Protein backbone atom coordinates (compact mmCIF):
# COMPACT_ATOMS: atom_id res chain seq x y z
CA UNK A 1 0.00 0.00 0.00
CA UNK A 2 1.37 3.39 -0.96
CA UNK A 3 1.25 6.20 1.63
CA UNK A 4 1.82 9.90 0.91
CA UNK A 5 2.64 12.23 3.82
CA UNK A 6 0.75 15.46 3.09
CA UNK A 7 2.24 17.29 6.08
CA UNK A 8 5.64 16.96 7.73
CA UNK A 9 4.09 16.25 11.14
CA UNK A 10 1.98 13.36 9.76
CA UNK A 11 2.80 9.85 10.93
CA UNK A 12 2.78 6.84 8.63
CA UNK A 13 0.38 4.04 9.69
CA UNK A 14 2.07 1.22 11.59
CA UNK A 15 1.25 -2.20 12.94
CA UNK A 16 1.82 -2.08 16.70
CA UNK A 17 2.72 -5.77 16.76
CA UNK A 18 3.81 -8.22 14.08
CA UNK A 19 0.47 -10.06 14.34
CA UNK A 20 -1.78 -6.97 14.32
CA UNK A 21 -4.52 -7.08 11.70
CA UNK A 22 -4.83 -3.31 11.43
CA UNK A 23 -2.54 -0.33 10.96
CA UNK A 24 -2.71 2.36 13.64
CA UNK A 25 -3.76 5.78 12.37
CA UNK A 26 -2.44 8.93 14.05
CA UNK A 27 -3.97 12.37 14.60
CA UNK A 28 -2.24 15.12 12.61
CA UNK A 29 -3.50 17.77 15.00
CA UNK A 30 -5.01 17.99 18.47
CA UNK A 31 -8.80 17.84 18.33
CA UNK A 32 -11.46 17.79 21.01
CA UNK A 33 -14.33 15.37 20.52
CA UNK A 34 -17.34 16.83 22.35
CA UNK A 35 -19.36 14.64 24.67
CA UNK A 36 -22.86 13.46 23.88
CA UNK A 37 -25.74 15.46 25.33
CA UNK A 38 -29.35 14.60 26.06
CA UNK A 39 -31.93 17.37 25.88
CA UNK A 40 -35.69 17.04 25.77
CA UNK A 41 -35.59 13.31 25.16
CA UNK A 42 -33.16 13.62 22.23
CA UNK A 43 -29.52 12.61 22.26
CA UNK A 44 -26.90 14.43 20.22
CA UNK A 45 -23.77 12.33 19.74
CA UNK A 46 -20.53 14.29 20.05
CA UNK A 47 -18.31 13.86 17.01
CA UNK A 48 -15.26 15.30 15.30
CA UNK A 49 -13.41 14.78 12.02
CA UNK A 50 -9.73 14.30 12.73
CA UNK A 51 -7.14 14.64 9.95
CA UNK A 52 -4.36 12.06 9.64
CA UNK A 53 -2.13 14.09 7.31
CA UNK A 54 -1.76 11.18 4.90
CA UNK A 55 -3.26 10.02 1.63
CA UNK A 56 -3.13 6.35 0.68
CA UNK A 57 -3.55 4.18 -2.37
CA UNK A 58 -5.57 1.15 -1.31
CA UNK A 59 -4.62 -1.72 -3.64
CA UNK A 60 -7.04 -2.39 -6.49
CA UNK A 61 -9.40 -5.21 -5.53
CA UNK A 62 -9.37 -4.12 -1.88
CA UNK A 63 -11.16 -1.60 0.30
CA UNK A 64 -9.94 0.26 3.37
CA UNK A 65 -11.98 0.05 6.58
CA UNK A 66 -11.29 2.47 9.41
CA UNK A 67 -12.17 0.88 12.73
CA UNK A 68 -12.23 1.79 16.40
CA UNK A 69 -9.36 1.09 18.77
CA UNK A 70 -10.60 -1.24 21.48
CA UNK A 71 -8.91 0.66 24.31
CA UNK A 72 -10.52 3.96 23.34
CA UNK A 73 -13.86 2.22 22.97
CA UNK A 74 -13.78 0.47 26.35
CA UNK A 75 -12.17 3.25 28.38
CA UNK A 76 -13.68 6.36 26.76
CA UNK A 77 -16.75 5.32 24.70
CA UNK A 78 -15.09 6.49 21.46
CA UNK A 79 -16.18 4.80 18.23
CA UNK A 80 -15.30 5.38 14.59
CA UNK A 81 -18.16 6.59 12.42
CA UNK A 82 -17.93 6.76 8.64
CA UNK A 83 -14.96 4.67 7.67
CA UNK A 84 -14.67 3.22 4.18
CA UNK A 85 -11.88 4.09 1.74
CA UNK A 86 -12.29 3.15 -1.91
CA UNK A 87 -9.18 2.21 -3.90
CA UNK A 88 -9.61 5.26 -6.17
CA UNK A 89 -9.73 7.87 -3.34
CA UNK A 90 -6.57 9.97 -3.05
CA UNK A 91 -7.54 12.71 -0.58
CA UNK A 92 -6.45 13.07 3.01
CA UNK A 93 -7.67 10.26 5.23
CA UNK A 94 -9.97 11.70 7.87
CA UNK A 95 -11.26 9.82 10.91
CA UNK A 96 -14.72 10.49 12.30
CA UNK A 97 -14.67 9.82 16.03
CA UNK A 98 -17.98 9.66 17.89
CA UNK A 99 -17.96 10.22 21.62
CA UNK A 100 -20.80 8.25 23.18
CA UNK A 101 -19.84 9.47 26.66
CA UNK A 102 -20.89 12.73 28.31
CA UNK A 103 -17.38 14.14 28.85
CA UNK A 104 -15.37 15.72 26.01
CA UNK A 105 -12.30 13.76 24.93
CA UNK A 106 -9.06 15.40 23.85
CA UNK A 107 -7.19 13.66 21.02
CA UNK A 108 -3.58 14.84 21.13
CA UNK A 109 -1.46 15.45 18.05
CA UNK A 110 0.33 12.23 17.14
CA UNK A 111 -2.04 10.03 19.18
CA UNK A 112 -3.18 6.66 17.85
CA UNK A 113 -6.92 7.14 17.37
CA UNK A 114 -8.16 4.47 14.94
CA UNK A 115 -7.08 1.48 12.88
CA UNK A 116 -7.00 0.88 9.15
CA UNK A 117 -7.86 -2.57 7.85
CA UNK A 118 -7.31 -3.46 4.20
CA UNK A 119 -9.95 -5.97 3.13
CA UNK A 120 -10.46 -7.92 -0.05
CA UNK A 121 -13.29 -6.41 -2.03
CA UNK A 122 -14.95 -8.39 -4.79
CA UNK A 123 -15.58 -6.45 -7.97
CA UNK A 124 -19.06 -7.70 -8.82
CA UNK A 125 -21.72 -6.64 -11.27
CA UNK A 126 -25.43 -6.31 -10.60
CA UNK A 127 -27.76 -8.56 -12.56
CA UNK A 128 -31.48 -7.83 -12.56
CA UNK A 129 -33.48 -11.07 -12.24
CA UNK A 130 -37.12 -12.12 -11.92
CA UNK A 131 -36.53 -14.48 -8.96
CA UNK A 132 -33.80 -15.30 -6.46
CA UNK A 133 -32.49 -18.77 -5.57
CA UNK A 134 -34.40 -20.42 -2.70
CA UNK A 135 -32.77 -20.80 0.72
CA UNK A 136 -33.81 -22.41 4.00
CA UNK A 137 -34.13 -18.99 5.64
CA UNK A 138 -35.93 -17.35 2.70
CA UNK A 139 -37.20 -13.89 3.66
CA UNK A 140 -37.34 -14.43 7.45
CA UNK A 141 -35.66 -11.45 9.07
CA UNK A 142 -34.80 -10.12 12.49
CA UNK A 143 -34.57 -12.87 15.12
CA UNK A 144 -35.59 -15.60 12.68
CA UNK A 145 -32.59 -17.80 13.51
CA UNK A 146 -33.27 -17.70 17.26
CA UNK A 147 -31.67 -15.92 20.20
CA UNK A 148 -29.38 -18.66 21.47
Image (cartoon, rainbow, N blue to C red):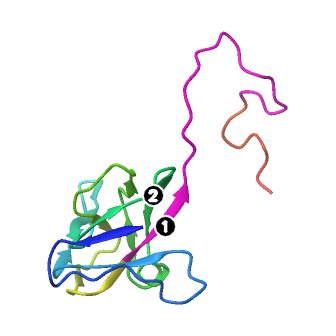
Residue 99 visible in image: no
Q: Quadrant of the C terminus?
A: bottom right
Q: Residue 133: say if magenta.
A: yes
N-term-proximal mark, 1 vs 2: 2
Q: Magenta segment range? A: 114-139
Q: Residue furthest bottom?
A: 17
- The quadrant holding residue 34 is bottom left
Categorize mark 1 by other alpha carbons within 10 Å: few (<14), some (14-19), many (20+).
some
Q: Nearer the viewer, mark 1 or mark 2?
A: 2
Residue at the spot 64% in from the left edge and 13% down from the top edge = 129
Q: Nearer the viewer, residue 49 or 115?
A: 115
In this rendering, the count of numbered labels is 2
Q: Secondary structure at mark 2?
A: loop
Q: Quadrant of the N terminus?
A: bottom left
Q: In x, y percent, where is residue 114?
A: 38, 75
Residue 115 lies left or right of residue 21; in this view the side is left
Residue 39 lies left or right of residue 130; in this view the side is left
- The quadrant holding residue 35 is bottom left
Q: Nearer the viewer, residue 24 or 141?
A: 24
Q: Which residue is mark 1?
A: 117
Q: In x, y percent, where is residue 94?
A: 26, 64
- The quadrant holding residue 46 is bottom left
Disc 1 from disc 2: Cα separation:
12 Å
Residue 101 visible in image: yes
Q: Residue 118: say if magenta.
A: yes
Q: Which residue is mark 2?
A: 59
Q: Secondary structure at mark 1?
A: strand
Amino acid sequence: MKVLKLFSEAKVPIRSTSEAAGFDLFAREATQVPGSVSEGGRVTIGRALIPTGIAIAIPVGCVGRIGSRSGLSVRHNLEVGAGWIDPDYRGEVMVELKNLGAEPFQVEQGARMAQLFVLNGANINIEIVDTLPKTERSDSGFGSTGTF
